[in-house]
Amino acid sequence: MERPLYPSPYMRITQGYMMGTHQDSYAIDEAGSDSGIDYINAPFTGVIRKIYTNDANEVWLESSEPVIYPDGTVDYMTMMFAHDNDVSNLFVGKVINRGERFYEEGTKGNASGNHVHMECGKGKFTGSGWHKNTAGYWSINNGKNPTECLWIDDSITVLDSYGYTFKKIEAEVVVPDTPVEEETPIVEEPTDSDLSDNSDTPNTDTSVDNNTDVVKPKLIFTCKSDDIYAIELKAGQKLYLE
Ligand SMILES: [Zn+2]
């Protein structure tokens, strides 16, 4: 399951939520690395559900599967992006993969400078996707605080978080299911008592060299060549190596 990643590689939030033109909404404005036009990556794998070109080229992206919210909640997520100057490359039903560049900053819809206005909504796309809020602005349905929806990781350069704290995706430690072949078996040195007691060993060859001072171990593994060998041992089994 995916963790929705903050969609700009450079976090520079220039307007927070519940203020200015974001009254009564959890919208934030993301302006990227500089005043130019930066790109936006898909925070999750999703499908475009609506494009509204009459205003600010708003695009709604709905997650294809439930995603993991920073508090551990698992649910679908829908995001709305606005101000891209040209969305002719997008269409309703288009599938966008997580991390794919799919949207750009812009000024469409009377934005004063290049940025992306974005809002997170909990759950799937509903109704017309948005509603006119109490402040008279159009806001995504089921809007939710972006810090409670989006994660960051080491790929995100935080230039200005606007004082917000986003939860970080920690690198996951990969534990193999089965031992790797190169694993070195524990070698138990033969002792005199082991060598004299052959009652638990099917191989009862106790022959010794003519040189009676040398007692050979009963099981001898001969390497065919210099290499790494894997040996599976059951509990209590002994391995003698020459
Ligand atoms: Zn905005």
Image (cartoon, rainbow, N blue to C red):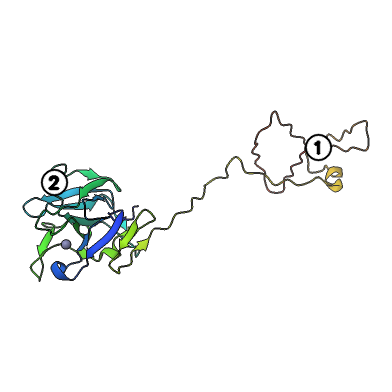
Residue 225, horizontal then vertical, whole percent: 69, 29
Residue 111's disc is none
Q: Nearer the viewer, residue 113 or 155?
A: 113
**Mark 1 residue element:** loop
Residue 20, horizontal then vertical, whole percent: 15, 70
Q: In what quadrant of the picture does the C terminus appear?
A: top right
* Outermost residue to the top: 224
Residue drawn 13% across the image and 46% down it:
86
Q: Nearer the viewer, residue 203 or 127?
A: 127
- In the picture, measured across the screen, residue 221 lies left or right of residue 56, that is right
Gap between marks 1 and 2 measured at Cα: 79 Å
In the image, residue 22 above or below residue 1: below
Q: Residues within 10 Å of mark 2 (few under 14, many from 20)?
A: some
* Outermost residue to the left: 54
Q: Nearer the viewer, residue 208 or 187?
A: 187
Q: Which residue is mark 1?
A: 218
- In the picture, measured across the screen, residue 71 lies left or right of residue 51, that is right
Q: Ligand 1: does it lie within 8 Å of the C-beta at label 2?
A: no
Residue 141 at least partly seen: no
Q: Quadrant of residue 33?
A: bottom left
Q: Amino acid at mark 1?
A: Lys
Residue drawn 77% across the image and 41% down it:
240
Q: Earlier in the sequence, mark 1 or mark 2?
A: 2
Residue 139 at least partly seen: yes
Q: Which residue is mark 2?
A: 86
Q: Amino acid at mark 2?
A: Asp
Q: Quadrant of residue 117?
A: bottom left
Image quadrant, ligand 1: bottom left
